[in-house]
C-alpha cells in the first residue's frame, strides 16, 4: 500500500492591481516523484493551463480568476490543492502602492458617509489589495461587529470581475447609527479604512435639519498698532472643539490682517449653499456705530476708520444671499464708538428671510470683559456660551440661557450684559441633524497636519516628530526622545529654524506660551521634550526648514556633543487654507517660530486693554480706567474686545 501525497505548501489567494507580476506556489511530498499541473477557472469555465507543470506558477494579473494545482505520483494517486482566487483590481492609482511593496494591505476603496432612512438597507463597502489577499473585520464605535443579528459580510462581483467587501444591515434602526470602519489584514500587517459616520433616521421625520454645517472663527490677539489681547486664543480654540461636537466643519484663524480676513470670509461665503447652518464668530478689537458692527484687523492703523476694518453687516448680507437656513453671528467685541464725525460704510439692509441670529457679548455702547486668574484667561461671554451651546433647543433660547447666566455674574454686574437680536422664524437648533445635499461643506475645514514620523540621529538616538494643528493657521511641532542608548546620557532636544531661513518664512509669534497650554490639553499628562509653534501659516511663501538639535554626553569620554537634522515642511501643506498669497506683511520684526524646551505655559486674551496714556485727541475714544476695572473684582478683569484708537 502506497503512502498518500501530502501537500506541504498550499497556494494563497492574492489581491493585486492589474499588470502586477507574482508567483503562486504549491509543494507536496510523497515516496515517489511527483507531477504538477495547474488549472484555471474564469467565469465558470475551467481549463488546464498549457505548460504549467511546475511547482511555481508565474502570473501577470489581467483578470480575476480561480486557480488550483493537481499533484499525482507514479501510482496514479492524485490530490488537488485548495482553490485560490487571484483578485485583480483594474483601477489602482500608481501612487497608491509603496515603492517597495512587500504585499502588506493597501486600502484602495474607503466606505462613505451615509444618511439612511429607518428600515432601509445600509451597505458599506471597502477594498484592499495585498499578498496574501487581506481578510476584513468591520467595527462600529470601536466595537467588533459579529456576522449576525441582520449583519453579514458578502462579496459582490462587478462587471470587471474585481471584488469589494461589504457589510449590509438589511433593516436599519436608529441604534445602528454610529462610526464605522474596517480593518484589512494579512501576514504582513493591517491597515484601517477611514472612519465614517452613519446616521439612521429620516429627513422627513425631522422637523428641521441642515444640509451642512460650516463655521468660521476668527480671533485677533497680536495687533501691530494697538494693545495686544489675551482671551481670543483660548475662546476660539474652545469654541471650535464644541462646534465640531455639533457636526460643524470649522476653520479657526488667529491674527489676520485686513486682506487675510477678507480672503477667509470670501472662501467661507463661497461654500455656503441652500439649507446650510452657518456660524461666524469674531473675538478681538471692534466697535459699533449706529447699529453697524466693524471688526478691527491686526494691521489697522492707529487712527482707523470703517475703510480699515471689516463690516459684519456686509458678511451677513452675503450669507443670506446663499439661502442658508440659519445664520448665527457671535460678536465677542466691544460696541463703543467715539468718533461721530466718521462716515458710515454703505451697506444694503438685510432681506426679511427670518433666518438670522445675532449674539452680542455686550449691549449697545458698552464694553466686553474678560476674566484672568493666574494662567487662565477667557472672555466672560465665552465662559457661559460654552456651558450652553450643546443644548438641544432653539438657538435663541440657548442664547437666552447664556444671557441669564452672564447677567447673574456679580463680577460684571452693571458693566456687561449680553444682547440678542434675531429674525429666526423657525425653532432651529445647532443640534439639528445633517441631511447632506452637496459636498461643499466637506471642503471647509479640511486642513490636515503632517503625519508623525521617527527620525534617527547619526549616534543612533531616535526622536519622534509630531504635528498638531491647534488652529487652521497655527501648527505645533512637538518632539519626544525615544529610547536612549546606554553609552549616552543627559540628552536634550531643541527645535529651531536655522538663521539663514528666518527672514524667508517671516511668520508671526502670537502668545506662544498660551499655545503650549492648549497643546498640553491635547496631550494631557504626556511629557514632550520640545514644542515649536508655527503661527500665521497663511503668510508662508516657501517651504519651511526646521532644525532638530540633539545635545548629549558620551559616558566614555564625558564629551558634550551636538548633532543636527533638518525637516522640510512644504508650504502647500502648511498654508493650504488660503489660496491668495498677496498679503501685506507686517512692518515690524517678528519671530518666525519658537523653540521652548521648558514648555512654560502662559495665558492671555482680552479685547480692549487699558492704556497708560492720559492725553487724547478729539477723535480718539476714551480708554478704560485700569484702576476702576481692578476695583470691580479681585480677579484680573479687563475690558475687551473693543477698539481703543479709531
Image (cartoon, grey):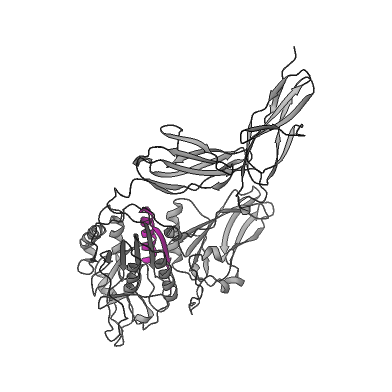
Residue 27, quarter of the rendered image: top right
The residue drawn where x is 27% and y is 57% is 428
Tell me: residue 137, above or below residue 1. below
Which residue range is magenta in the image?
Answer: 230-256
Residue 374 in view in this figure: no
Residue 34, quarter of the rendered image: top right
The answer to whether residue 395 is left or right of residue 576 is left
Residue 497 spot, x, y in % from top left: 58, 67
Say whether residue 232 is magenta: yes
User: Which quadrant is home to the C terminus?
Assistant: bottom left
Say whether residue 398 is magenta: no
Residue 434 spot, x, y in % from top left: 36, 53
User: Which quadrant is home to the N terminus?
Assistant: top right
Task: Name the residue at the front extreme.
Answer: 45
Tell me: residue 628, above or below residue 17. below
Tell me: residue 208, above or below residue 610. above
Residue 518 spot, x, y in % from top left: 42, 59
The answer to whether residue 537 is left or right of residue 101 is left
For the residue pair 305 and 220, the one nearer the viewer reads as 305
Tell me: residue 467, above or below residue 21. below
Residue 421 spot, x, y in % from top left: 23, 67
Residue 27 in view in this figure: yes
For the residue pair 613 and 45, the one nearer the viewer reads as 45
The answer to whether residue 591 is left or right of residue 38 is left
Residue 58, quarter of the rendered image: top right
Task: Name the residue at the top extreme.
Answer: 1
For the residue pair 485 and 342, the one nearer the viewer reads as 342
The residue drawn where x is 28% and y is 84% is 339
Amino acid at each position: 500500500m502506497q503512502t498518500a501525497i501530502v501537500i506541504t505548501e498550499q497556494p494563497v489567494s492574492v489581491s493585486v492591481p492589474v499588470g502586477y507580476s507574482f508567483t503562486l506556489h504549491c509543494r507536496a511530498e510523497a515516496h515517489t516523484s511527483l507531477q504538477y499541473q495547474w488549472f484555471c477557472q474564469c467565469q465558470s469555465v475551467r481549463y488546464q493551463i498549457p505548460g504549467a507543470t511546475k511547482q511555481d506558477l508565474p502570473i501577470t494579473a489581467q483578470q480575476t480568476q480561480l486557480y488550483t494545482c493537481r499533484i499525482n505520483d507514479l501510482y496514479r494517486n492524485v490530490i488537488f490543492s485548495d482553490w485560490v482566487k487571484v483578485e485583480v483590481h483594474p483601477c489602482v492609482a500608481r501612487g497608491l502602492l509603496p515603492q517597495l511593496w512587500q504585499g502588506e494591505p493597501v486600502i484602495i476603496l474607503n466606505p462613505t458617509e451615509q444618511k439612511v432612512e429607518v428600515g432601509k438597507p445600509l451597505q458599506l463597502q471597502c477594498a484592499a489589495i495585498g499578498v496574501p489577499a487581506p481578510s476584513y473585520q468591520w467595527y462600529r464605535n470601536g466595537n467588533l461587529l459579529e456576522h449576525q443579528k441582520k449583519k453579514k459580510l458578502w462579496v459582490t462581483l462587478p462587471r470587471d470581475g474585481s471584488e469589494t467587501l461589504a457589510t449590509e444591515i438589511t433593516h436599519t434602526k436608529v441604534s445602528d447609527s454610529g462610526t464605522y470602519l474596517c480593518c484589512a489584514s494579512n501576514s504582513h500587517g493591517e491597515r484601517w479604512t477611514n472612519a465614517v459616520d452613519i446616521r439612521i433616521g429620516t429627513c422627513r421625520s425631522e422637523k428641521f435639519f441642515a444640509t451642512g454645517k460650516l463655521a468660521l472663527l476668527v480671533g485677533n490677539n497680536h495687533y501691530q498698532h494697538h494693545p495686544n489681547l489675551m482671551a481670543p486664543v483660548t475662546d476660539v480654540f474652545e469654541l471650535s472643539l464644541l462646534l465640531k461636537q455639533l457636526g460643524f466643519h470649522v476653520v479657526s484663524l488667529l491674527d489676520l490682517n485686513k486682506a487675510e480676513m477678507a480672503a477667509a470670509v470670501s472662501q467661507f461665503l463661497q461654500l455656503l449653499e441652500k439649507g446650510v447652518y452657518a456660524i461666524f464668530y469674531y473675538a478681538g478689537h471692534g466697535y459699533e456705530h449706529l447699529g453697524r458692527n466693524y471688526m478691527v484687523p491686526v494691521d489697522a492703523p492707529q487712527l482707523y476708520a470703517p475703510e480699515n476694518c471689516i463690516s459684519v453687516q456686509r458678511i451677513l448680507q452675503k450669507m443670506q444671499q446663499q439661502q442658508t437656513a440659519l445664520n448665527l453671528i457671535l460678536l465677542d467685541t466691544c460696541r463703543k464708538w467715539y468718533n461721530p464725525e466718521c462716515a458710515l460704510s454703505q451697506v444694503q439692509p438685510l432681506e426679511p428671510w427670518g433666518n438670522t441670529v445675532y449674539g452680542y457679548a455686550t449691549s449697545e455702547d458698552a464694553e466686553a470683559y474678560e476674566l484672568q486668574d493666574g494662567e487662565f484667561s477667557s472672555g466672560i461671554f465665552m465662559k457661559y456660551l460654552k456651558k450652553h451651546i450643546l443644548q438641544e433647543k432653539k438657538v435663541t433660547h440657548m442664547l437666552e440661557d447664556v444671557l441669564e447666566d452672564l447677567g447673574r455674574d456679580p463680577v460684571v454686574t452693571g458693566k456687561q450684559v449680553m444682547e440678542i437680536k434675531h429674525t429666526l422664524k423657525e425653532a432651529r437648533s445647532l443640534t439639528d441633524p445633517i441631511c447632506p445635499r452637496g459636498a461643499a461643506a466637506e471642503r471647509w475645514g479640511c486642513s490636515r497636519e503632517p503625519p508623525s514620523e521617527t527620525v534617527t540621529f547619526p549616534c543612533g538616538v531616535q526622536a519622534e516628530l509630531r504635528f498638531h494643528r491647534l488652529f487652521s493657521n497655527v501648527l505645533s511641532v512637538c518632539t519626544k526622545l525615544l529610547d536612549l542608548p546606554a553609552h549616552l546620557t543627559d540628552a536634550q532636544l531643541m527645535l529651531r529654524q536655522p538663521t539663514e531661513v528666518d527672514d524667508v518664512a517671516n511668520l508671526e509669534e502670537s502668545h506662544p506660551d498660551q499655545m503650549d497650554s492648549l497643546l498640553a490639553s491635547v496631550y494631557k499628562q504626556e511629557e514632550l521634550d520640545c514644542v515649536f509653534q508655527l503661527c500665521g501659516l497663511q503668510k508662508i511663501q516657501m517651504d519651511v526648514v526646521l532644525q532638530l538639535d540633539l545635545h548629549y554626553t558620551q559616558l566614555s569620554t564625558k564629551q558634550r556633543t551636538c548633532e543636527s537634522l533638518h525637516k522640510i515642511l512644504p508650504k502647500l501643506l502648511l498654508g493650504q487654507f488660503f489660496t491668495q498669497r498677496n498679503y501685506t506683511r507686517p512692518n515690524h520684526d517678528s519671530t518666525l517660530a519658537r523653540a521652548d524646551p521648558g514648555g512654560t505655559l502662559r495665558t492671555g486674551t482680552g479685547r480692549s486693554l487699558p492704556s497708560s496714556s492720559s492725553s487724547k485727541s478729539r477723535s480718539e475714544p476714551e480708554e478704560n480706567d485700569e484702576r476702576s476695572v481692578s476695583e470691580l473684582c479681585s480677579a484680573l478683569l479687563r475690558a475687551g474686545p473693543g477698539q481703543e484708537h479709531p
